[in-house]
Image (spheres, rainbow, N blue to C red):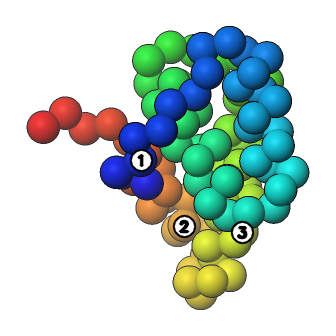
Amino acid sequence: MKSWQGTLSEQWKTRSTANQAAIDKGDPYGYAEVVKGLSVMQEQNALSMTDRRHLNLGMAFLCEELANALGKTQARVRQLIEEATTFRPA
């Protein structure tokens, strides 16, 4: 997730539709893209209510998937994801 170089649309409706489609697809990679993209946006400015909802849904689903795959608690997985999505200047 640290190396993700994707971008999200500046237009809220396009971004919202794409994020909802990624979540509805049920693909963990889609969840990761939603979480990373919206986490980057959140660091730059406040998220809209829809963006926050998508970030929370993506995070919850991603945590569940990774916790099951890695045999870790969802709380630990969330901590690892938050560390990976936090911007740290070099």
Q: Is residue 83 above or below residue 38?
A: below
Q: Which residue is mark 2?
A: 77
Q: How dense is the environment of label 2, judged by Cα within 10 Å: few (below 14), some, or many (20 and up)?
A: many
Q: Which residue is mark 1?
A: 4
Q: How dense is the environment of label 3, judged by Cα within 10 Å: few (below 14), some, or many (20 and up)?
A: some
Q: Position of residue 33 (x, y in %)?
A: 58, 47
Q: Are marks 1 and 2 in contact (CB under 8 Å)?
A: no
Q: Is residue 83 visible to the viewer in this orientation of the structure?
A: no
Which secondary structure lies at badge 3? helix
Residue sitting nearer the eye, 72 or 54:
54
Kind of residue at disc 1: Trp
Q: Is residue 31 left or right of residue 87?
A: right
Which of the two labelled residues, at mark 3 and mark 1, occupies the earlier sequence position? 1
Q: Is residue 84 left or right of residue 7?
A: left
Q: Position of residue 75 (x, y in %)?
A: 59, 64
Which of the two labelled residues, at mark 1 and mark 2, occupies the earlier sequence position? 1
Q: How dense is the environment of label 1, judged by Cα within 10 Å: few (below 14), some, or many (20 and up)?
A: few
Q: Residue at x 72, y 42 (%)?
A: 56
- Give the farthest residue toward the bottom: 71
Q: Which residue is mark 3?
A: 64
- Give the farthest residue toward the right: 24
**In whole angstroms, how far apart are the C-alphas of marks 3 and 1?**
21 Å
Kind of residue at disc 2: Val
Q: Residue at x 87, y 51 (%)?
A: 24
Q: In the picture, residue 29 is in which quadrant? A: bottom right
Q: In what quadrant of the picture does the C terminus appear?
A: top left
Number of the label disc, if any, that sits on residue 74: none
Q: Is residue 57 above or below residue 77?
A: above
**Mark in the foreground, 1 or 2:** 1
Q: Position of residue 86 (x, y in %)?
A: 38, 41
**In whole angstroms, how far apart are the C-alphas of marks 1 and 2?**
18 Å
